Amino acid sequence: MYLLVVILISFASSQGVTAFFSLPPSLALDTTTRAIASRRCAFFNAGEYEQYDDDNMERHGHHHSDALAHNLRRTDPLIFLTQRAIQSFMVLLASTRDPHTSKWIEDNYNCQGIEQYHGTGAFNLTLWPSWESLLTDMLQKPEDVVVVSAKRRGRGHGGWSKNNPYLEERWVEFNIDINPPSIVTRILSVREQIGKEWLHDLDTMVVANEQILTSYKEKSTSARSDECLDEDAESPSEDCLATETKATKSSAYDRTSMLLMDNTIEFESLNSSPQRKGNFDLLILLATQESIHRVLREYRDAGLSRQVSFEWLRTFYIDRVATFFDGSQEYGRADDFLEELLLTPPSMKTVSNKVELVDPFRIAEDVIRTRSMVGMEWKEKMKDVSAAHLELRRLLLLRHMENAATPSPFAQAAGSEGFE
């Protein structure tokens, strides 16, 4: 078996290519693999302001419309679909033993180890502000070549003794062509498949979403059952408090989303994409973030009637953005955020000399309600994924025709070698 040592030789001008993957500087990573993936990917800092706070961005010199546009792009399911299509495509390349195409993508877009990145915000939204912008850039790149150097013979290889110092190693080199338009075509196919899967997965998310509050109330009632009360006491016994604390620490509600996802996959006739469960987990996380953004705007637009709730939720959310939403995350972070919100006790908050009771349960209800609406809206967007690819496929066809009419410089170089 050949020992492959891959050396990428780029004939195209790639000196000025800037990274398109952005990982926030504050990453909460728990595994070595994700830490390595996050360090390798390019970091992008959109500014010294809080990226997810419309008002804060405006105070730091950014127009409100720009702040709103940034937040809408950050939670755009179509941009996220492109990200997951590229990641899934690179996983497929690894399964088919094609590391050369993956390396070309990594080197040209500075995204080493991106296939291990489990997060929603991998794109640099300044460089790639729409779902098709990166793919359009890729299809316009010239043909490239990867030169692979393989050991043919030598110590410990090809049946030769590894301890013989007189054996001379022999190497053979061969070229692997890289056709960027062809890569884009294959990524689009993966993107369409994932889009079709999300049509069903968003229904699953909505079903699981509607069970959260019912499950939470049932668990809360069970934890405070009459069996835990002393007959002659006005307060719960120590055993009751211990039981309630144990139930709270285990889970505030039944997390059924992944179980429902397993059932969905089990009864489907077609094979799933390679990262479907990971896609589903991150889809819920992105929908949760979009729901929080919408609830914040709803509270802000309501004026004085919801001013205290707006200030409280904005602070609660901003303090937890890096922990639950940015960077490479563990599975179930959307449930972790909602659980922390549900378990936060009511409190009094003063804003502009106005004192008001803040009820986190009421706020959680609004977020959960909005998340179901987001799921149904995104489902409509997934229906149009294939149609949205038509223009890009037209450009791909034109590019393929240009390549057919103009031989690549690599083919010309290879054909001229025999006449020298």
Image (cartoon, rainbow, N blue to C red):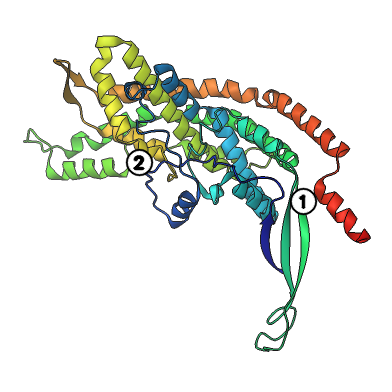
User: With 398 as the anchor, is 264 left or right in this view?
Assistant: left
Position above or below: 282 against 292: below
Screen quadrant of the C terminus? bottom right
In the image, residue 197 sits, relative to residue 29, either above or below, namely above
Q: Residue at x 54, y 47 (%)?
A: 114
Q: Is residue 298 left or right of residue 78?
A: left
- Say which of 404 and 297 sits in front: 404
Q: Report the amino acid beneath label 2.
A: Thr
Whether residue 210 is visible, yes or no, is no
Disc number at residue 257? Answer: none
Q: Amino acid at mark 1?
A: Asp
In-image side of 180 versus 304 (left or right)? right
Which residue lies at the image location 42% right of the left edge and 54% below the top edge?
A: 31
On the image, numbered disc 2 is attached to which residue?
A: 323
Q: Position of residue 104 (x, y in %)?
A: 65, 50
Upstream in the sequence, badge 1 or badge 2? Answer: 1
Depth check, front residue: 312 or 160: 160
User: On the rendered image, what quadrant is the N terminus found in?
Assistant: bottom right
- Displayed quadrant of residue 414: bottom right
Q: Is residue 87 visible?
A: yes
Q: Which mark is residue 177?
A: 1
